[in-house]
Each structure stands twice: as C-alpha cells, then as structure tokens.
Image (cartoon, rainbow, N blue to C red):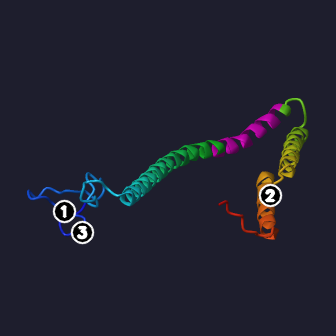
Amino acid sequence: MSSPGSRNYRTDSNGVPITVAAIPLSDPNATGTGEPTIGNLVRDATTQVSALVRAEVELARAEVIRDVKKGVAGSIFFIAALVVLFYSTFFFFFFAAEVLKIWLPAWAAYLIIFAAMVFVAVLAVLIGYLQVRRIRGPQATIESVKETANVFSREDEAPRTPKPSSP
C-alpha cells in the first residue's frame, strides 16, 4: 500500500485514498472525459498480468517447496528402513548357512551361501550393465537442435530480396 509520503498516495477532500497502488480502484491517468487512453489500458493490463504471473509463480514455488520437504521427510524413513533391511540380511545369510549345516559340513554350507551371494551380485552387475548400455542420450533434443540449426543456416544462405509491394 502507499504511504502518505509516497507519490502514489492521493486523497480526496475527506482524506480517503483515491487509489491504492496494489489494487487499482480508479485510474488516476484517465483523460478529462473520464475515459482512460488505450496506452494506459495496455500498460495497466500488462502490469496486472505481470503481477498475476509473478503471484502464480510464487504460489507454485511455495507448493513445490512444501511438497519437496514432505518428500524428503518421507524418504528419510525409507532410507532408514533400507539400512535396517541391509543389516538384517547379514543375519539371514547366517541363518541359511546354519540350516544347511544340518545336512552338510559347515564349510560346505558357508561356501554354498557365499557362492549364491556372488551369483546374485554378478547377476545384478550384468543387469545394470545392460540397462546402462541402452542409454542413448536425448535423441529427440539432438535432432530438434540440428533441425533448428539447419533452418537458421538455410535462412542465412538464402539471398534476401525485398518483397514487391502491391499498389
């Protein structure tokens, strides 16, 4: 809002503000007939659209920040659960080896569990490698940039002749 010392602060004979800088209640730039000029209307519309866009961007920013904070808080609990699960697998492998010890010597039971773990690790590496090998980069973007460059280079190469004007 405007303060009494500012340029936009105008009052009528009763001391009531005529205009408010943030919310235009009347147009101080109106012509003598009371009708605003087209230039003033365009300027005011541009200013108001700009203010609206800024407000929408600020609202979106605030909502995104709020949602990111909630996401971070939730992901902390997922990470904690994964850490506990990771440490508990250690005990599961000992359990599996102890179960195998019932029928096999201890060294064989632990060797089987070790071999199974190595097999799973190798399988995970292979699957990861195959997934990474499929990455081709932003092909559509590369093509679009090439097309744009070709369009601009063709425009630069073409001779520029003035268009004949019709009488």
Q: Tell me the residue at 19%/69% (across/down).
A: 5
Q: CA distance from mark 3 to mark 2?
A: 52 Å
The quarter of the picture where the C terminus appears is bottom right
Indicate the amino acid at tag 2: Glu
- Circle 1 SS class: loop
Q: Tell me the residue at 65%/43% (across/down).
A: 82
User: What residue occupies the far left of the structure in this picture?
Assistant: 14
Indicate the amino acid at tag 3: Arg
Residue placed most toward the observer, 25 or 144:
25
Residue 67 position in % (x across, y down): 51, 45
The span shown in magenta is: 83-99
Q: Is residue 151 left or right of residue 123?
A: left
Residue 120 position in % (x across, y down): 85, 42
- Circle 3 SS class: loop
The residue at which mark 1 appears reads as 10
Residue placed most toward the observer, 92 or 67:
67
Residue placed most toward the observer, 148 or 42:
42
In this rendering, the answer to whether 28 lies above or below 69 is below
Residue 19 position in % (x across, y down): 23, 57
The residue at which mark 2 appears reads as 147
Q: Residues within 10 Å of mark 2 (few under 14, many from 20)?
A: few
Q: Is residue 57 left or right of residue 22?
A: right
Q: Quadrant of residue 88?
A: top right
User: Which label number is shown at residue 7?
Assistant: 3
Q: CA distance from mark 1 to mark 3?
A: 8 Å
Of marks 3 and 2, which one's residue comes earlier in the chain? Answer: 3
